[in-house]
């Protein structure tokens, strides 16, 4: 098929750029991918979508590749939407849901964005990609690069969780640990660009990761029969998903696919250990200052400076949303709460959404009967150092006083 | 809806037992669930199935719960089927595929079986479940028990991978480590049964885990447009999936849903470190001796005695299959091969299938153009101790000789 992309558009000043060729940023700020939505509406129906396989590619006409042959897929999407009755009750919410992104390739929602970035790189004939990453993005990039037969380079802070390091190496990426932070890793990617000729797939430094993350919003709309929830709680690091979902909702609205005018209030959830977006929101700023001494066990939220800060702030404000920083010390508690009440493997990033829900219900900002959805962006299983706990040890054949057992 | 289950049937002697009530084993051997397949055929069509959500529940009429309200779900299935062109080429196969079970709740195919066991326990009003486990089954049981609001007890060898221990604890299960093997854990489950009144959901000790695993076969058939592949390579510990798939294929055949008479040759894949089924197959036995000193990094294959041994052997022989033990020392190499050539996070258990393919192609037992599928039963990310590797460390701002980089 042919893509319905018309052009790319600078998010900072609206300048149009040509699609169909390699683009990165404009004035050091991200680009939007724009579509001929009238043509999409004429050529794609809800019935068509519903009959296609349950992957992100069911929304093909709203996605950027020109040729189907470019698609690099590991079977990503669609992730389940699960009602959380018990956890909702605990929080004082009667209509509480999770979209469980742990059930994707490499166990996190990073697969959506990197699937699209690698697909488009593949379409443009790129054979070598690089990324600075402090968490799951590296594993997702390495996997999709391997699937495409591309060479991959990953630069990670030396204290990146071990599983993230190893999954990149297993997928054949060239992995370098850096005694520093993610911006120091970014410096290596920049420094090597001329000699190595690699394409940088950092968050929002190319236009297509947003389009991949957008599918979280498309799936949500379809799963709720084209009616959007009242509130979306989103664990926000670089914010690509928040931005991408808002874009998806607006595209669907423009296409007339939504059954209700109701648009969700978008909520940025961060840990107090790294809350640049919350601070900017509270100060009424559109651009966020660098967050010094960023420290949180939710490694995906350890993003002290986001190149899409203004896009995040615009989304939150346009939607009538808010931004919440939760207590770092309670992250593990919220993970355990979600897992023990509902069986969902909520990672530390998404645990901040549970904390934010608690706070926003208490404040009256969320009403008890509103439909609220949060995103579980990655499987807790990738964070053994966060889950670690001491367990009782029995000797084999040991006599047990069973009356000591149980709750 | 109403279930189409007619009765349970002893796998060892054909005795009929009543469905609709709690059952465990008969003469210490497993039970089959039997359906009125004529009635299923009259009430379920392929078109109906294809329009239902992409979970294992799309095959509702071939599954055991009497009431939909009993269903305990975390959005399990359907897992993607991915063609592996590059890995196939490396192995000398032109039509090679993986069914990627890593994209399920808790990251492994154990979710299928435990989803069904917990669903049926829930239907029968059971409020407390227990399991001995040396790997991923514990995490899956704990998650589904939490989702059902049941109390869960898990007994694991003290050397069970840390992630498996922690995921159970996070999901609120009472976890006990045992200084011994899985049979020592089983002894605790048995010893506590009278006092604790828990229901034992061990592999094949209740009838429904097979029905959950059966869905791997149903999905495969549907994904290949109701034509089965020539060969299925299956990483075999307790063997529930192998048995369950063969049952699924026979049910589909009896219903007339298969477009071809071709039934796959089922291949047991084990590590030489624990290969009781391979040994029994080679000796022409139907029952397998206990495998002494079982040791393999593929923790899910560390099953020295399987209660369903004769069902595994019957399946392999009926299907014209075989059984292969691969080199323990090469497991990590096969994981890396699959991950680096295809981006699939193949766990150590499934890596034995890559080794088996290599061997069976070399032997001429598999022809180069046959359609061959293997099952990736769990995400490599749950095995950091197997993936562990040393990586180069850079100091920030360090000058790099880029000509040293690359392959």
Image (cartoon, coloured by chain):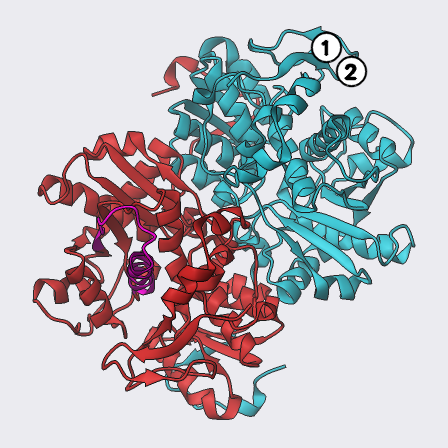
Chain colours: A cyan, B red
Compare marks 2 and 1 and give the one earlier in the sequence: 2
Q: Chain for mark 1?
A: A
Q: Which residue is mark 1?
A: A27
> Relative to the observer, which residue lies in front, A302 or A22?
A22
Q: Are marks 2 and 1 in contact (CB under 8 Å)?
A: yes
Q: Position of residue B261 (x, y in %)?
A: 22, 50
Please tell me whether residue A321 is drawn above or below residue B146 in the rendered image: above
Q: Which residue is mark 2?
A: A12
Relative to A46, A263 lies left or right: right
3D distance between C-alphas at marks 2 and 1: 8 Å
> Relative to the observer, which residue lies in front, B244 or A195?
B244
Residue in view at x 28 percent, y 75 percent? B307
Q: Which residues are magenta?
A: B239-267
Report crowding for label 1: few under 14, some 14 to 19, many 20 or more residues within 10 A (C-alpha): few
Question: Is residue A236 magenta-colored?
Answer: no
Question: Is residue B252 magenta-colored?
Answer: yes
């Amino acid at each position: 098929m042919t893509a319905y992309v018309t052009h790319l558009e600078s998010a900072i000043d609206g300048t149009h750029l040509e699609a169909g060729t390699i683009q990165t940023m404009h004035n050091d700020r991200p680009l939007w991918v724009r579509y001929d939505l009238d043509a999409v509406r004429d050529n794609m129906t809800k019935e068509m979508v519903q009959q296609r396989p349950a992957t992100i590619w069911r929304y093909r006409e709203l996605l950027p590749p020109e040729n189907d042959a470019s698609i690099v897929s590991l079977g990503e999407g669609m992730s389940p939407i699960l009602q959380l009755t018990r956890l909702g009750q605990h929080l004082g919410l009667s209509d509480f849901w999770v979209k469980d992104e742990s059930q994707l390739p490499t166990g996190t929602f990073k697969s959506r964005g990197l699937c699209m970035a690698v697909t488009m790189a593949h379409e443009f004939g790129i054979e070598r990609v690089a990324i600075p990453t402090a968490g799951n993005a590296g594993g997702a990039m390495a996997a999709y690069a391997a699937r495409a037969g591309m060479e991959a380079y990953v630069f990670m802070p030396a204290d990146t969780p071990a599983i993230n390091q190893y999954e990149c190496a297993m997928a054949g990426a060239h992995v370098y640990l850096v005694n520093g932070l993610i911006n120091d890793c970014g410096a290596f990617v920049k420094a090597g660009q001329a000699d190595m000729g690699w394409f940088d797939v950092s968050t929002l430094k190319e236009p297509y990761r947003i389009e991949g993350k957008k599918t979280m919003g498309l799936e949500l709309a379809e799963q709720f029969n084209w009616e959007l929830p009242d509130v979306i709680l989103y664990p926000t690091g670089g914010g690509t998903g928040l931005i991408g979902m808002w874009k998806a909702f607006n595209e669907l609205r423009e296409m007339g696919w939504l059954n209700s005018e109701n648009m969700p209030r978008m909520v940025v959830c961060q840990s107090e250990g790294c809350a640049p977006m919350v601070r900017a929101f509270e100060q009424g700023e559109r651009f966020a200052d660098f967050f010094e001494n960023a420290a949180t066990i939710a490694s995906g939220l350890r993003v002290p400076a986001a190149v899409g800060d203004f896009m995040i702030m615009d989304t939150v404000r346009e939607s009538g949303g808010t931004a919440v920083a939760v207590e770092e010390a309670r992250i593990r508690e919220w993970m355990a709460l979600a897992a023990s009440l509902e069986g969902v493997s909520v990672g530390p990033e998404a645990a901040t959404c549970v904390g934010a829900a608690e706070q926003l219900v208490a404040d009256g900002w969320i009403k008890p009967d509103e439909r609220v959805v949060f995103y579980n962006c990655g499987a807790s299983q990738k964070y053994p150092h966060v889950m670690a706990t001491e367990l009782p040890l029995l000797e084999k054949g040991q006599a047990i006083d069973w009356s000591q057992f149980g709750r």
